[in-house]
Amino acid sequence: MLFRSASFAGEKHRGQLRKDAQSTAYINHPLNVARILAEEGGVTDAEVIAAALLHDTIEDTKTTQAELANHFGAKVAAMVVEVTDDKSITDSVERKRLHVMSARHKSRGAALVKLADKTSNVRDVGVRPAVGWTDARRTEYLMWAQRVVDALPIKDHRLKVIFDEAVKKSRKLIAGHGRTATNHMG
Ligand code: ZN
């Protein structure tokens, strides 16, 4: 099922790129989220890892819940729906507020996927930020991700510690970058 999920996600995200300077293939992101869950988080539930591989397919590609349920079962499909943002809400402040609110009510599996997703994004904001993001915007993202993770109904998992470390490391990288920029100007 995991190889089928990875292959399905690869097909769906074909041609999509991350927004970093290296234009990383989009599929690297869900693959990394799945790896964080399994390798760093010790998660062994294959349905949760499959949901991680598929977590952006509904949000960012033309994939439906029914399609996922057909291929991977209702449970995996439901977890992906749980981690999908409602893009019909165009106000980004409102969407972010709802994102934090809904974090409180996630199932265990969906909460773990969210946690690994935010860990991956927080690391990327440190080492390969989106092109054009200022240090202020990067820092803002870290604070927002922290709010989402704090709202998740997970208090006791080692992935929480891993997330906190990722935030600290990225903060340092951003601060270091700020100093370098100032030095160059001086
Ligand atoms: Zn993601």
Image (cartoon, rainbow, N blue to C red):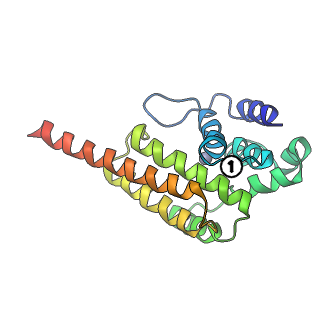
Image side of residue 55 versus residue 173, left or right: right
Determine whether 119 is above or below 100 in the image. above
In the picture as drawn, the residue positioned furthest to the right comes out as: 70
In the picture as drawn, the residue positioned furthest to the left comes out as: 186
Kindly identify the residue that appears in the image at 64 percent across and 36 percent down. 31
Kindly identify the residue that appears in the image at 46 percent across and 44 percent down. 123
> In this orientation, which residue lies closer to the viewer: 161 or 153?
161
x, y (%) of residue 133?
Answer: 38, 45
Q: Residues within 10 Å of mark 1 (few under 14, many from 20)?
A: some
Image side of residue 64 versus residue 100, left or right: right
Residue 85 showing in the rendered view: no
Which three-letter amino acid code belongs to the residue tagged 1? Glu
> In this orientation, which residue lies closer to the viewer: 61 or 143?
143
Which quarter of the figure is the C terminus placed in?
top left
x, y (%) of residue 9?
Answer: 73, 35
Kindly identify the residue that appears in the image at 27 percent across and 42 percent down. 177
Q: Which residue is mark 1?
A: 59
x, y (%) of residue 78?
Answer: 81, 56
Determine whether 21 is above or below 47 in the image. above
x, y (%) of residue 181?
Answer: 20, 40
SS at badge 1: helix
